[in-house]
Image (cartoon, rainbow, N blue to C red):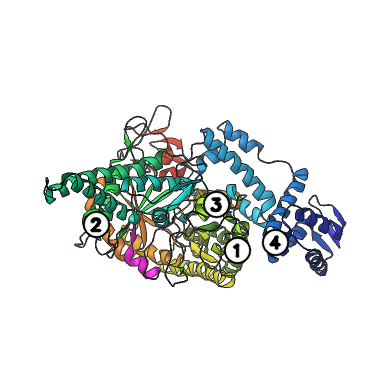
Amino acid sequence: MKVIKRDGRVVDYDREKIAVAIQKANGEVKAKERATKEDIKMIIEYIEELDKKRILVEDIQDIIEEKLMELQKYELAKKYIVYRYTRALVRKQNTTDESILGLIRNENKELAEENSNKNTMLASTQRDYIAGEVSRDLTKRMLLPEKISKAHDEGILHFHDADYFIQPIFNCCLINISDMLDNGTVMNGKMIESPKSFQVACTVTTQIIAAVASNQYGGQSVDLIHLGKYLRKSHDKFEKELREQYDGKLSDDMIEEIVQMRLKSELASGVQTIQYQINTLMTTNGQSPFVTLFLHLEENDPYIKENALIIEEVLKQRYKGIKNEKGVFVTPAFPKLVYVLDEHNCLKGGEYDYLTRLAVKCSAKRMYPDYISAKKMKENYKDCVFSPMGCRSFLSPWKDENGNYKWEGRFNQGVVSLNLPQIALIADGDEEKFWSLLNERLEICYEALMCRHYSLLGTASDISPIHWQYGAIARLQKGEKIDKLLKGGYSTLSLGYIGIYETTKLMKGVSHTTKEGHDFAIRVMRKLRETTDKWKEKTGLGFALYGTPAESLCYRFARIDKQKFGTVADVTDKGYYTNSYHVDVREDIAAFDKLSFESEFQNISSGGAISYIEIPNMRNNLKALEEVVKFIYDNIQYAEFNTKSDYCHECGYDGEIVINDNNEWECPQCGNKDHNKMNVTRRTCGYLGENFWNEGKTKEIKSRVLHL
């Protein structure tokens, strides 16, 4: 057998080199984690029994890693990967120098635009990005199989968050805030006991959010329904103090009036603590915590009145906004808000309709909250209502040992997204070729997702005590492995997808809103869903189909395909692909029709998806927004509003965004020039290419900024 080296040289196979490599890794782990002589012999014999005349050295190393995993030698496999890396460093040139130096010089535009929540000028953010670039490089060259790295580079798929893959950390989660508040937690080696008041509960919650966000790379969600009991505790505490001090001196009504005054003040202060702490804290990855607050009421909740007060205060403060450095009230990026519509607040005469009207008013000014229909969610998720994770993905149903559904304290291991339009570009209308190529690429996605799973196997709880030992996810023992939480569907692995519209257009010549296009698009969606369901059945892992809401990925895939296939009308000429299953923004479709149409696709996405509609002049259309909210409740699980008018997210200005003397878009109210924080509508000719035309002047601007 001949071995083909990385530089193309062909050398004789030498079994001793395999044994030496594994033994060197053996020397780095504890005795019980080591491969025995029999294990090593078995691996060598397996390679030789393949009876190949020629074999790539990478294939040999992949087989060794695979066999070590099968032997459950996870620590050893990791050491072997590191051994591969250190050997490869001698051979391979470092590829991160230019990107890192460009970042420090503020010349790396791709990184600067990758995440609008990160300021690449800040030293703390640069430190995270530098580490991320090194991780991305090692991931691409050493940690991932070459075909997956190649598939990522060619835009076949997107291996999300490669800049964190080198670490045993995961994507998004639902923080088990109830457990952490009720039973206490530990942060930085210090015991945090269960709070005795609402204000303290809010403070502890923000501390938990910051600690959790610093030890994972995705978003976190917190269900505020667990704070109601602490508002009740504050009420009872105030009442007790007043009765002890003024017993017999004040009437019961007077005492209750004073209690309510103090409670109102504490409520406002507690919610303000959450809002300001989240926006002023900086996590170790150089940004504010990517957190979502889940706002919902349950009829059987003993603290429903308190929770209604909390939701009302959250919405009031979000409507007001937060002052920026110029003293202007602006829309904060975080926390995201998700508001649940149910029978008691769906604007049909329910007791809590007033909260929904306040939410609509807030949406009109601040673009938040998003809306979830409890009615539709219960149809899709076993009569349950729960929060999306910070990245807008949803967990799959999972029951504990007592047969109860569990949502909080669960997480997503990672995401890989598939470029559907590229498959259609290659198939060129040939359906047989399309389905065959789709199957091939789904297998690559499966392998990429399994890489994410394997990278977490064997992780000790000590890697992030806040997650694994002190309640955010679990309460494991020190040194205990997290493996049981990776299996059995407890956590999810998400297959994302981009560009159903463009795929249908290429294969059928029509939009998926037509009868012929719809039938094809639904077949594609069902194929994706069936595939993830089969993976789940095959492995016992929580695979789910996810309508990836990553705008930057819509541009990355389109850019790669335009370079490869040229300008294709209604596909690569736009500079972006349509997000997930969404209707193309240029189609003339009414808001209700869009939501009704997309709801069918959303239901197939077991791992979550969000739809949006654009409403012109939202501040002056509150009644229209209320009608849309009613429609959302009856027709679609998850939706949000955008606006067709110019809009500045920094200050809420909804007049015309102007071009200043430096040829930059600028908000005339607050002076905001950050394109990530404004909508600019098309003017004059409606040209949809890479440049933006305005009254005869061409303005170079990223189209994602325009929210077209």
Q: Look at mark 3 in the image and give the residue it sits on.
A: 557
| Element assignment for label 2 | helix
Q: Residue at x 39, y 41 (%)?
A: 277
Q: Amino acid at mark 4?
A: Lys
Amino acid residing under circle 2: Lys
Left or right: where does residue 391 sit relative to residue 683?
right
Judged by depth in the image, the label closer to the viewer, 2 or 1, is 2
Q: Earlier in the sequence, mark 3 or mark 1?
A: 1
Q: Are marks 2 and 3 in contact (CB under 8 Å)?
A: no
Q: Mark 4 vs mark 1: give the one in front.
A: 4
Q: Earlier in the sequence, mark 4 or mark 1?
A: 4
Whether residue 13 is visible here, answered yes or no, is no
Tell me: 379 left or right of 577.
Answer: left
Q: Nearer the viewer, mark 4 or mark 3?
A: 4
- Badge 3 crowding class, 10 Å Cα cut-off, few under 14, some 14 to 19, many 20 or more, is many
Q: Nearer the viewer, residue 346 or 220?
A: 220
- From the image, tell me which residue sits under label 2: 305
Among numbered discs 2 and 3, the one appearing first in the sequence = 2
Amino acid type at circle 3 is Phe
Q: Tag 1, which secondary structure?
A: helix
Q: Nearer the viewer, mark 2 or mark 3?
A: 2
**Distance (Cα) linking label 4 and label 3:** 37 Å
Residue 241 on the magenta span: no
- 141 shown above or below 345: above
Instruction: Report the span colored magenta.
Output: 370-391
- Between the C-alphas of marks 2 and 3, the distance is 48 Å
Residue topped by disc 4: 73
Residue 446 circle label: 1
Q: Are marks 4 and 3 in contact (CB under 8 Å)?
A: no
Do the residues under discs 4 and 2 have CB atoms within 8 angstroms? no
Find out whether the residues at labels 3 and 1 contact each other: C-beta distance under 8 Å.
no
Q: Taking the image as drawn, is residue 479 in sight? A: yes
